[in-house]
């Protein structure tokens, strides 16, 4: 019997979840991530039911001297949740959610998805900043930053994090909050999975919905230059309650028509939301107007069909210095050459509460007003991979004259060159390296945008 098999047999006596090896039924399905381009074969998948399972899995991996990866929702486009011959700590069975209505706090385990969290909190007309794709996991999105429809009013997801329970590299469980291990709490708010495995997270809740104002208005790509200039001008005067994104996409009706859309979410009173979206509805000659009252849960799931599980994905993302006319022209020309009807270019606008937090208040330095551009190449045939990856890289390359250094850690691809952590964390990087040395000196958690110990 191999050392791994012996360790599994020993752990299985107390393990609450499942320990899945390559020869076991269901291994192939269990190892799959959202991005179908990722095809790795872990030596063992520990499907955990609680923090004790996670701690045992970490100790087992350390004893066997094999790498550790962590899967929450499995949405990370670079596939950092898995690696060949590693032990994957799978949090996806950990679905506990408790809403404390009086305290306006939600406690959730590390395998919860945003659509699951929103469903529970919206029973009480409460929400916290979450992802814009409902099948994304709460833990990975939050620890890396956490963009969402509420960020302009209530900050990033990590700004709403009250505390987290973490399994550390030595198997200990630590609490990180403003009053317990405060330096660790600072680090995990943006530092990703570098410091431990978040088995539970607590968030501040806000009065939102259940009906808010939102949706999309779309125009033909032939009008994209005027539409994107209009979008830029609208973004300059938005209230905190309103978030706008723009997208270049192919119509989902099978017609092949290329479109430019403005996506809106207004979390304030419906009367204010109706007034806020009026200019969007009145501009130009839209081919689709789906802006109006909408359940908050529906707004958060609006993009889900555009990101089917198993589709092959390759992304490039970076901040723009400004959404200039030159940048707009490059975006349009690049999308005209897009080879896949499943691909997009998205512009995410940053303003409001998320940008008013001091850069050194959390590990996340992404506190700048402006636009984040995300080039999302998506396709289904492995034979066409080189073509679609090239389009994303070429588009990013064409945008180079307009790009700022800042990049969002959750969107970074696995093949990006250089010290990604230095790029992602900027002025906060030296402190993060010191805290990595304190909490994970052996760099056990390195399948991430890795912060090397000082």
Image: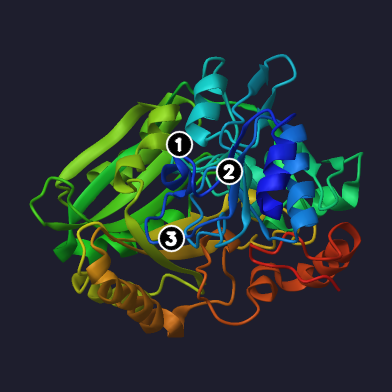
| Count of numbered circles on the image | 3
Question: Which of the marked residues, 2 or 1, is nearer the chain's N terminus?
Answer: 2
Q: In which quarter of the image is residue 316?
A: bottom left
Q: Which of 295 and 420 is in front in this view?
A: 420
Q: Tell me if residue 102 can be seen.
A: yes
Residue at 48 percent of width and 56 percent of height: 349
Residue at 26 percent of width and 45 percent of height: 217
Q: In which quarter of the image is residue 107?
A: top right
Percent across and percent down for residue 44 are 60, 49
- State left or right for residue 428 relative to residue 267: right
Q: Nearer the viewer, residue 447 or 119?
A: 447
Give the number of the mark in front: 3 or 1: 3
Q: Nearer the viewer, residue 282 or 350?
A: 350
Q: Name the residue under label 1.
A: 266
Q: Tell me if residue 145 can be seen.
A: no
**Residue farthest to the bottom, as pictured:** 401
Give the number of the mark in front: 3 or 2: 3
Mark 3 vs mark 2, CA separation in Å: 16 Å
Which secondary structure, mark 1? strand
Q: Nearer the viewer, residue 68 or 211?
A: 68
Q: Give neighbour class at mark 1: few <14, some 14-19, many 20+ (Cα, 10 Å).
A: many
Residue at 39 percent of width and 83 percent of height: 397
**Which label is found at residue 196?**
none
- State left or right for residue 341 relative to residue 426: left
Q: Mark 2 points at which residue?
A: 72
Percent across and percent down for residue 202 are 72, 32
**Which label is found at residue 38?**
3
Mark 3 vs mark 1, CA separation in Å: 36 Å
The quadrant of the rendering that contains the C terminus is bottom right
Percent across and percent down for residue 273 are 42, 32
């Amino acid at each position: 019997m191999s050392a791994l098999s012996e360790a599994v047999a020993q752990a299985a006596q107390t393990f609450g979840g499942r320990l899945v090896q390559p020869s076991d039924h269901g291994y192939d399905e269990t190892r799959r991530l959202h991005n179908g381009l990722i095809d790795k074969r872990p030596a063992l998948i520990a499907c955990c039911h609680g923090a004790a399972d996670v701690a045992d899995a970490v100790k087992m991996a350390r004893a066997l001297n094999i790498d550790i990866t962590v899967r929450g929702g499995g949405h990370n486009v670079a596939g950092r949740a898995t690696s060949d011959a590693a032990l994957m700590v799978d949090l996806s069975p950990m679905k506990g959610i408790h809403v404390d209505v009086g305290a306006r706090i939600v406690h959730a385990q590390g395998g919860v998805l945003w659509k699951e969290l929103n469903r529970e909190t919206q029973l009480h007309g409460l929400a916290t900043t979450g992802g814009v794709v409902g099948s994304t996991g709460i833990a990975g999105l939050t620890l890396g930053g956490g963009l969402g429809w509420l960020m302009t009013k209530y900050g990033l997801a990590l700004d709403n994090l009250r505390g987290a329970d973490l399994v550390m590299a030595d198997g200990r469980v630590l609490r990180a909050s403003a009053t317990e291990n405060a330096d660790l709490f600072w680090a995990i708010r943006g530092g990703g999975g570098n410091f431990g495995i978040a088995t539970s997270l607590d968030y501040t809740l806000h009065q939102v919905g259940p009906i808010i104002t939102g949706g999309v208005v779309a125009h033909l790509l032939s009008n994209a230059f005027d539409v994107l200039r209009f979008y830029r001008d609208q973004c300059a005067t938005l209230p905190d309650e309103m978030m706008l994104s723009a997208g270049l996409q192919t119509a989902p009706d099978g017609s092949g028509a290329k479109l430019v859309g403005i996506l809106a979410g207004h979390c304030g009173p419906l009367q204010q939301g109706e007034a806020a979206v009026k200019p969007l509805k009145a501009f130009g000659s839209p081919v689709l107007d789906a802006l109006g009252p909408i359940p908050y849960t529906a707004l958060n799931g609006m993009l889900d069909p555009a990101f089917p599980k198993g589709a092959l994905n390759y992304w490039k993302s970076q901040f723009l210095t400004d959404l200039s006319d030159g940048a707009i022209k490059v975006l349009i020309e690049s999308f005209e050459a897009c080879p896949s009807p499943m691909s997009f270019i998205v512009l995410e606008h940053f303003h409001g509460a998320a940008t008013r937090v001091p850069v050194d208040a959390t590990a996340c330095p992404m506190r700048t007003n402006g636009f984040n551009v995300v080039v999302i190449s998506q396709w289904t045939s492995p034979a066409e991979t080189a073509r679609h990856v090239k389009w994303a890289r070429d588009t990013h390359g064409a945008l180079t004259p307009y790009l700022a250094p800042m990049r969002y850690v959750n969107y970074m691809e696995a093949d990006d060159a250089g010290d990604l952590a230095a790029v992602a964390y900027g002025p906060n990087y030296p402190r993060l390296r010191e805290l990595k040395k304190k909490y994970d000196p052996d760099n056990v958690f390195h399948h991430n945008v890795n912060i090397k110990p000082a």
